[in-house]
Image (tube, rainbow, N blue to C red):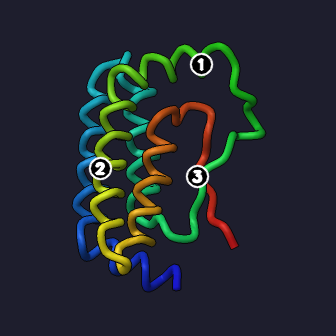
Amino acid sequence: MNFLGNIIWLIFGGLATAIGYFLGGVAMMATIIGIPFGFQLIKVGSLCLWPFGRTFQVDKRELPGCLYTLLNIFWFFIAGLWIALLHVVFGFLLFITIIGIPWGLQHFKMAGFAIHPFGRRVDIVG
């Protein structure tokens, strides 16, 4: 089911959205200050590319500290809030139909990740 959900996701906008995240990440890396933020956009794009069967969790190898907290605060006001709101809107739009509920849940998952991605990693479940 995860494979079929991911294929449908890619066909109906997931690939275009992931490419947008990847291009935004590369553009952010044009400046030295934007490099950590560019990596986070690429991380969100990788989750957006293949969302079914993947989850995110706090990176246990590197426990989040004050630097991650500071970067997450900057991220929230610069990009995280707007990305999360966009995913929430698309999630609600997909919840209008019963068929769209699984894809809406994926948008809600990505909204939660987009709020504060520093100190988290994307894992494959199962």
Label 2, label 1: how many angstroms apart (C-alpha)? 26 Å
| Total marks placed | 3
In the rendered structure, are the residues bearing label 3 and label 1 in contact, judged by CB atoms less than 8 Å apart?
no
**2 and 3 marks in contact (CB < 8 Å):** no
Which numbered disc, 3 or 1, marks the residue closer to the eye?
1
**Where residue 119 sits: x, y (%)?**
62, 33
Instruction: Compare residues 101 and 43 and report the one nearer the observer.
Output: 101
Q: Quadrant of residue 97?
A: bottom left
Q: Which residue is mark 1?
A: 69
Residue 69 in picture, x, y percent from top left: 59, 18
Q: Secondary structure at mark 1?
A: helix
Give the Cα distance between marks 2 and 3.
Answer: 23 Å
Residue at 33 percent across and 79 percent down: it is: 8
The circle on residue 17 is none
Q: Quadrant of residue 82?
A: top left
> Can you say whether 35 is above or below 60 in the image?
above
Is disc 3 placed on a helix, strand or loop?
strand
Taking the image as shown, residue 90 lies to the left or right of residue 5, namely left
> Mark 2 vs mark 1: which is more N-terminal?
1
Residue that numbered label 3 is attached to: 122
Amino acid bearing label 3: Val
Q: How far across and down, in percent of the image, does residue 91 sit? A: 35, 57
Q: Residue at x 57, y 63 (%)?
A: 54
Left or right for 78, reference 125 = left
Report the residue marked by disc 2.
89
The nearer-to-camera label among 2 and 3 is 2
The residue nearer to you, when weighing 86 against 118, is 86
Quadrant in which residue 111 is drawn? top left
Q: Which amino acid does the dot numbered 1 rest on?
A: Thr
Q: Amino acid at mark 2?
A: Val
Dot 1 crowding, Cα within 10 Å, few <14, some 14–19, many 20+: some
